Image (tube, coloured by chain):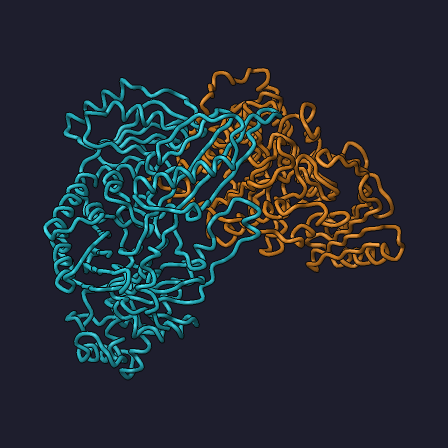
Chain colours: A cyan, B orange
């Protein structure tokens, strides 16, 4: 059995799924933001009360713990040490109160321009330690090309710091400012996340459960607890990804499609290309700092059930503000959901209150109740459409670097809409009309996120760089740096990377993976020429394991979505 | 967090799958390290700097500018249409006011491509700046344009295309033609009879470094631009004046380039040459991006750069100052012609022999410009090359008078009738059409 749990901002959703009989138990309880562990404990208790005979193999957890810590600035102070060659002034990337630029640098091929000044490092580290700093982040410009400077500094910190994040271990992606921010946040949430993990383990033991614990990531994949301990930053923003994975679990999607998850304050838009959810290698921003955390391509827009409805100068406005809950839920300001209540047979909460509130809006516009409710809904749907279209334009505008790709370029054109969240059922026909596309509302749409969490598989991405002139190859995220013969080629590089990824996933994640599940997303081999002679090849390969769901559980939850 | 002064768009298209041949300077690897540097610096994450995908230019966009023989298709590859399209895209960002400035970081380059095209010259097949400028003229109705060419090689193609156009100011600053390809671009080349003084050439001696370049920018280019008042300033930015460039002999630096951009203050920068792909391009291109956005570029320094190594001696500086004085004069007090024009009836005639070093083609042409009192005058060019013989191009230029519109049409009809030419291309700019005739 799989246990999926999504500890969100307002609700904690949990499901228990059996390989044969599908969803055995589910629950939706309010989250106590002050006590996430308490919410988890409650959810487990609730599930176990519904299903007595449990044998949980995997416990998959999506949590806002790190996201909240970052948003609320409840972070451990981090000693940030950066080294940079020429370019933008490294001080412009300053983050936190303990940031220092170490003399030394590499160029774009990883060649040392200036050695690291170790005496300087020593001085800075002593000062930071004296200030009570326990965790560090070490980041070098172009460290994915050559991690030597990061390693030297980390070596010096060995035994002195409780935890050190080296930038190159997070991603092979080139982006120094993002690497700095990602490494900083990784170290900053490390203590709180690791304490939390211990408590979760303890909590499961209280229930006599000892499953394998996995943590959900923003890209819709999982990582095992042992891995998550080192890269806690990857656990941020996993909620929207869990919802998208929920749709993938519940419905068979093969075409270009979009997912709309209508929440209280916002609607999350997700996009599928030929049935595969779009991943963005660099998506997540933390406190306005972009990071290297891979995430599902999701856009949140300011329109949800509680979005305020008002009339200003005879003009009707729907959202993007939320001024408390909707009237049906005891709020004071009429909201989007109240309008839906007016026209629906199955209303939500106090439908009479909704009617009264929307009637008042109607008076301002000299409009009868039904008509004004319809207007509100149509306007909301129009806003949704507008946002979806601009989101698609943005996706379709992404840069491309080869003639082949540019000429073969296929725009994403959705054929279906998958709708979930509270008001999904009522909204469906209006969305269908607005977009001119079939709308599908799956069963269990209320806990789809927890289903997604339960069924998600590990994901990972890795890059290999080989320079046959220098006779060196690196795979930064696996901390591999090895010599290669001058004859090393793209085919070998591709095989090397795929084998290393299989090795890594099998050993670290305890997961059996087939070579064909690893996808090459970018590869190139270019002549490096000096004067007029070819002196070597610059080889680059990037592979990923796409997000997906456990095949052996797929059939048990499928076929419960309706058009 | 860095704050930009100007919102800029960067159309980055490195064409990682195209080369003239594998070890040619214009090869796949050319913008690889520039990409690495821009990505590693997180340039596209800076609010106000955005990366765009290029458009693909159409055959029509090329035909509006060039006489291509036997046709456009046999002279180009997809990469040329994308690099021209990328330049158009960058310009559209400005015209649609989406961005204040834009940088087309595309390849292959185009400034050696002349009015007539039989093949590739100096790694160029079609002139990406001219294609963009004429697109803007047709779509947005702009008239006055300045193209400032800072490539180390004289932009003989752009000069040729705008030789007779008084509304396009072309300024080229480059290594002296006596010491470098294509061997032209002397101060005496000032434009055709109807546009004299609107082509300005600033040849600089080998080993000119920052001081010399910036002197010319401040004392020649800036005052001329201030006077000409173009609607748009385009910088054909070759990065091959860099001290590490393998095929030229100048000593310019990345910070010098960034400063040059600051003085020039262009709306649009278009990458031209530059073949020091590791030592120069990553730093120069980064410097230009930062400078365009109005950000600090003082940390953009080549690892091996020591300004003291490249100080200019007084004699060379004096020589540059004298050249600059002459150039200022070419614009503000344009000297009269030294030799009378050749005439044939009401046509002004010029003969040329052109060598296409990239395609190894030789072309001979006779150019006829109608001496019209009301406009620039119809142009026709008889052209034969070692590849295609007996070609004719007729152009009724932008802003042509009614008489010239009629005359152009008549010339086209007559030439078809006579049957002397195998390929005729008729560009009718006021009528927004291009007609072809092939025997």
Residue at position x 43%, y 38% in the image = A497
Among the 4 quarters of the image, the one containing residue A27: bottom left
How many marks are shown on the rendered structure? Answer: 0
Among the 4 quarters of the image, the one containing residue A438: bottom left
**Front one among A453 and A69:** A453
A172 sits left or right of B178 in the view: left
A272 sits left or right of A92 in the view: right
The quadrant of the image that shows the C terminus of chain A is bottom left
Residue at position x 21%, y 32% in the image = A163
Q: Residue furthest bottom?
A: A368
A279 sits left or right of A289 in the view: right
A66 sits left or right of B44 in the view: left
Is residue B38 shown above or below B231?
Answer: above
**Front one among B45 and B330:** B45
Q: Position of residue B175 (x, y in %)?
A: 63, 26
Q: Position of residue B311 (x, y in %)?
A: 51, 17
Is residue A238 shown above or below B146?
Answer: below
Among the 4 quarters of the image, the one containing residue A367: bottom left
Residue B259 visible? The answer is no
Q: Position of residue A327 (x, y in %)?
A: 18, 72
Residue at position x 22%, y 24% in the image = A125
Is residue B197 shown above or below A372?
Answer: above
Residue B420 visible? The answer is yes
The quadrant of the image that shows the N terminus of chain A is bottom left
**Front one among A262 and B133:** A262
Q: Position of residue B336 (x, y in %)?
A: 74, 34
Is residue A440 shown above or below B269?
Answer: below
């Amino acid at each position: 059995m799989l246990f999926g749990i999504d500890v969100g901002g307002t609700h904690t959703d949990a499901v228990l799924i059996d390989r044969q009989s599908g969803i055995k138990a589910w629950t939706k309880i309010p989250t106590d933001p002050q006590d996430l562990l308490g919410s988890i404990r409650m959810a487990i208790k609730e599930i176990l009360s519904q299903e007595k005979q449990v044998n949980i193999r995997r416990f998959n957890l999506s949590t806002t713990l790190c996201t909240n810590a970052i948003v609320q600035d409840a972070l451990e102070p981090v000693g940030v040490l950066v080294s940079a060659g020429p370019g933008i002034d490294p001080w412009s990337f300053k983050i936190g109160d303990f940031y220092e630029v170490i003399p030394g640098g590499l160029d774009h091929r990883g060649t040392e321009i200036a050695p690291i000044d170790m005496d300087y490092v020593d001085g800075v580290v002593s000062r930071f330690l004296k200030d009570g700093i326990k965790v560090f982040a070490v980041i070098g410009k172009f460290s994915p090309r050559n991690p030597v400077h990061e390693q030297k500094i980390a070596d010096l910190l060995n035994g002195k710091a409780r935890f050190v994040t080296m930038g190159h271990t997070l991603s092979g992606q080139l982006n120094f400012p993002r690497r700095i921010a990602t490494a900083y946040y990784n170290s900053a949430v490390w203590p709180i996340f690791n304490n939390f993990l211990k408590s979760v383990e303890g909590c499961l033991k209280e229930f006599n459960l000892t499953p394998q614990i996995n943590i959900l990531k923003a890209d819709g994949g999982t990582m095992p607890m042992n891995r998550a301990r080192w890269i806690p930053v990857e656990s941020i923003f996993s909620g929207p990804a869990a919802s998208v994975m929920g749709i993938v679990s519940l419905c068979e999607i093969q075409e270009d499609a979009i997912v709309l998850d209508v929440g209280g304050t916002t609607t999350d838009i997700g996009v599928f290309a030929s049935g595969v959810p779009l991943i963005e290698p660099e998506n997540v921003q933390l406190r306005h700092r972009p990071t290297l955390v891979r995430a599902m391509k999701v856009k949140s827009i300011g329109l949800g059930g509680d979005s305020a409805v008002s009339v200003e100068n005879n003009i009707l406005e729907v959202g993007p503000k939320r001024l408390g809950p909707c009237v049906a839920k005891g709020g004071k300001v009429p909201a989007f959901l109240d309008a839906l209540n007016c026209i629906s047979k199955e209303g939500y909460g106090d439908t009479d209150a909704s009617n009264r509130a929307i009637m008042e809006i109607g008076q301002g516009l000299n409009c009868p109740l039904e008509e004004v409710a319809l207007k509100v809904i149509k306007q909301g749907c129009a806003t949704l459409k507008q946002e979806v279209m601009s989101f698609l334009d943005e996706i379709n505008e992404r840069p491309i670097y080869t003639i082949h790709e540019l000429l073969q370029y296929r725009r994403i054109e959705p054929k279906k809409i998958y709708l979930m969240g509270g008001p999904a059922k009522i909204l469906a026909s209006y969305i269908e009309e607005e977009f001119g596309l079939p709308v599908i509302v799956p069963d269990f749409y209320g806990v789809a996120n927890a289903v997604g969490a339960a069924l998600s598989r590990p994901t990972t991405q890795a890059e290999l760089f080989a320079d046959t002139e220098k006779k060196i190859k690196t795979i930064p995220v696996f901390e591999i740096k090895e010599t290669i013969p001058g004859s090393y080629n793209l085919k070998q590089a591709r095989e090397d990377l795929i084998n290393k990824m299989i090795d890594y996933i099998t050993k670290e994640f305890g997961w059996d993976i087939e070579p064909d599940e690893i996808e090459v997303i970018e590869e190139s081999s270019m002549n490096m020429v000096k004067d007029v002679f070819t002196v070597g090849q610059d080889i680059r390969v990037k592979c990923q394991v796409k997000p997906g769901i456990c095949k052996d559980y797929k059939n048990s939850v499928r076929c419960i979505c309706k058009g | 967090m860095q704050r930009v002064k100007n919102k800029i768009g960067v159309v980055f298209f490195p064409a990682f799958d195209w080369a003239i041949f594998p070890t040619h300077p214009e090869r796949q690897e050319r913008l690889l390290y520039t990409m690495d540097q821009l990505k590693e610096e997180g340039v596209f994450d800076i609010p106000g700097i955005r990366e765009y995908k290029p458009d693909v230019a159409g055959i029509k966009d090329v035909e509006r500018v060039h006489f291509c023989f036997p046709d456009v298709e046999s002279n180009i590859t997809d990469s040329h249409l994308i690099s021209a399209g990328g330049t158009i895209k960058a310009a559209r960002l400005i015209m649609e006011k989406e961005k204040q400035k834009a940088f087309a970081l595309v390849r292959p380059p185009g400034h050696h491509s002349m009015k007539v095209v039989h093949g590739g010259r100096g790694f160029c097949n079609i002139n990406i700046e001219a294609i963009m400028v004429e697109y803007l003229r047709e779509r947005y109705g702009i008239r006055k344009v300045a193209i400032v060419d800072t490539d180390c090689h004289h932009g003989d193609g752009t000069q040729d295309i705008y030789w007779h156009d008084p509304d396009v100011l072309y300024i080229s600053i480059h290594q002296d033609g006596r010491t470098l390809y294509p061997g032209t671009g002397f101060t005496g080349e000032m434009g055709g009879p109807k546009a004299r003084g609107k082509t300005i050439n600033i040849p600089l001696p080998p080993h000119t470094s920052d001081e010399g370049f910036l002197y010319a920018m401040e004392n020649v280019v800036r005052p001329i631009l201030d006077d000409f008042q173009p609607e748009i300033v385009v910088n054909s930015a070759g990065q091959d004046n860099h001290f590490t460039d393998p095929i030229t002999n100048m000593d310019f630096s990345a910070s010098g380039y960034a400063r040059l951009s600051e003085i020039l203050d262009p709306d649009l920068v278009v990458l031209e040459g530059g073949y020091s792909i590791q030592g120069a391009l990553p730093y120069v291109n980064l410097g230009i991006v930062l400078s365009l956005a109005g950000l600090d570029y003082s940390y953009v320094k080549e690892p091996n750069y020591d300004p003291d190594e490249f100080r200019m001696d007084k004699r060379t500086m004096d020589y540059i100052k004298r050249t600059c004085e002459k150039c200022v004069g070419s614009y503000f007090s344009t000297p009269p012609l030294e030799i009378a024009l050749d005439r044939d009836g009401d046509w002004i005639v010029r003969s040329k022999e052109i060598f296409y070093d990239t395609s190894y083609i030789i072309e001979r042409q006779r150019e006829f410009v109608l001496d019209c009192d009301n406009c620039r005058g119809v142009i026709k060019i008889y052209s034969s090359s070692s590849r295609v013989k007996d070609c004719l191009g007729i152009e009724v230029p932008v802003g042509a008078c009614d008489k010239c519109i009629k005359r152009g049409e008549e010339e086209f009809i007559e030439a078809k009738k006579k049957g002397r030419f195998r390929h005729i291309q008729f560009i009718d700019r006021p009528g927004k059409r291009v007609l072809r005739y092939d025997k």
